[in-house]
Amino acid sequence: PIPGADAPHVHYLRSFADSKAIVRKTSTAKRAVVAGASFIGLEVAASLRQRGIDVDVVAPERVPLERVMGHELGRFIRSLHESHGVVFHLGETVTAIDGRRVSLSGGSTLDADVVVMGVGVRPATALAEQAGLTVDRGIVVNEYLETSAPGIFAAGDVARWPDPRSGEHVRIEHWVVAERQGQAAAKNILGRRAPFADVPFFWSQHYDIPINYVGHAERWDEVRIDGSMDAHDCAVSYMQAGRRLAVATIYRDRESLQAELAMEQS
């Protein structure tokens, strides 16, 4: 735990109530520190900047979102935020919060009227573990979203399921996937025995730039870029052995939908 992380001006964004609390706080704030350069952290940073608040983002990685989006798109996202006035402190973490002073691992301090913790969450697997279900960085399920105990199902952020395209068990934290899995799990609870094979999809909005992502790629050996990120018109494909596992697009909605359809049919 970070000393001071329970202070009243330190917020998390996990619910609509959290969102309203942050909005109320920012009505009088002038400076904010966002801990974490995740999707949540960066979307919060964009929202705060649009409200005229000075924003510092502190994160341990060297390139924002590199693990998910790759170096090229991560570098573009960083430059986009910097062009809107966000100041990054990469390769560092928040070590303590003492009133308005936020201490970083590199020894420097930042002033903040509000601190938003966007450092991610862990799946809540305690109940599953106590029940003896198979757990591996989430609750392991089969293609019907059924756990290791027959008749017990899991869906959403907590479920690690077999992706038929990559051949790997994956866990995806996005409400679109959770919603679709909930529908599939309900059908299977009713005895339909319908495998969940939907193509994962999510989007992330940064200022006026939407990034749509379809498929799933935890690793790749090639990144193919069609178009120009700087011109806000591109498709970024994540390839493994010549096969496209995922594609991220900026202002190419038709191409994103076509990629999703092609993955469904493959």
Image (tube, grey):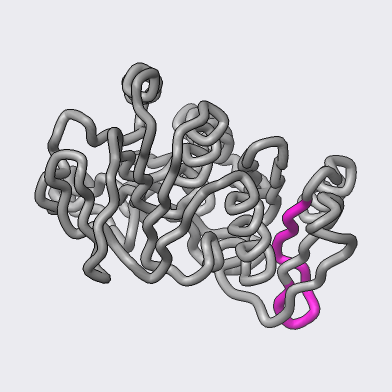
Residue 191 seen from this side: no
Query: At 85% across and 60% down in the image, what residue appears?
Result: 228
Q: What count of labels does the image hold?
A: 0
Task: Left or right? Give the position of 154 relative to 248.
Answer: left
Q: Position of residue 221 (x, y in %)?
A: 68, 82
Compared across the picture, whether 24 is left or right of 201 comes to: left
In-image side of 104 versus 209 (left or right):
left
Quadrant where the image shows the C terminus: bottom right
- Residue 50 position within the rendered picture, expressed as x and y whole percent measured from the top left: 57, 30
- Is residue 117 something that shows in the picture? yes
Q: Residue at x 46, y 42 (%)?
A: 40
Residue 266 falls left or right of residue 41: right
Nearer-the-camera pick, 78 or 134: 78
The answer to which quarter of the image holds residue 212 is top right
Please tell me which residue is depicted at 38% across the width and 60% down the height of the picture. 59
x and y percentages locating residue 147 in the rendered image: 36, 49
Residue 52 vs 161, above or below: the answer is above
Query: Which SS type dominates the magenta stretch?
Result: strand
Hey, which quadrant is residue 254 in on the image? top right
Does 46 appear in magenta?
no
Q: Nearer the viewer, residue 8 or 49?
A: 49
Residue 248 lies in the magenta stretch? yes
Q: Is residue 229 above or below residue 106?
A: above
Q: Which residues are magenta?
A: 239-249
Residue at x 36% of width, y 39% of height = 32
Whole-percent x, y for residue 239 in the image: 74, 73
- State whether residue 41 is above or below residue 20: below
Q: Nearer the viewer, residue 99 or 235?
A: 99
Q: Please, is residue 130 above or below residue 105 in the view?
A: above
